[in-house]
Image: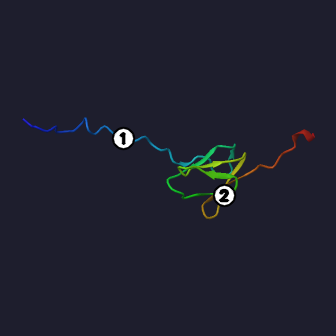
Amino acid sequence: MAHKKGAGASRNGRDSNPQHRGIKRYAGQSVTAGTIILRQCGCHHRPGFNVSLGKDFTIFSLIDGKVKFESRNRVSVYPEPATSEASN
């Protein structure tokens, strides 16, 4: 008779939850303030205008506007121009 467990089934039951990283809003999409644009591991993309960086390197919008991915891995949000529909 074996004096050790063969498969170790009771010891192998650990796994971490997925982190769901990646781009959540693409260039040209409209976002509201507080919307997560990008979740990343490390600071690969840097915050630009009107966005901020969370403690887990999440980039999120500070204003309502449109997302723009600029040169040198910079992500910005620019406000949309106001349209006057009441002028009819």
Q: Secondary structure at mark 2?
A: loop
Q: Residue at x 90, y 39 (%)?
A: 86
Residue sticking out furthest to the left: 1
Q: Nearer the viewer, residue 11 or 82?
A: 11
Residue 26, given in percent of the width and then of the height, sits at 63, 50
Along the horizontal axis of the image, is 8 left or right of 24?
A: left
Q: Is residue 40 above or below residue 2?
A: below
Picture coordinates of residue 88, whole percent (x, y): 93, 39
Q: Residue 52 versus residue 67: which sits nearer the camera?
A: 52
* Placement of 31 over or under 68, stated as above or below: above
Residue 42, position in %: x, y? 51, 56
Q: How is the image coloured?
A: rainbow
**Label 1, residues with CA under 10 Å away: few <14, some 14-19, many ≥20:** few
Q: Which mark is residue 5?
A: none
Residue 15: which disc? 1
Q: How many other residues sit within 10 Å of disc 2, few (<14), some (14-19) or many (≥20)? A: some
Task: Point out the tag, 1 or 2, that comes first from the N-terminus.
Answer: 1
Residue at 87 percent across and 43 percent down: it is: 84
Give the residue at mark 2: 48
Quarter of the picture containing the N terminus is top left
Q: CA distance from mark 1 to mark 2?
A: 35 Å
Expressed as whole percent of the image width and height from the top left, the position of residue 55 reads 55, 50
Q: Quadrant of residue 44?
A: bottom right
Question: Is 29 rendered above or below residue 48?
Answer: above
Q: Report the amino acid beneath label 2.
A: Gly
Indicate the secondary structure of the residue bearing disc 1. loop
What amino acid does circle 1 point to?
A: Asp
Residue drawn at (64%, 43%) of the image: 35
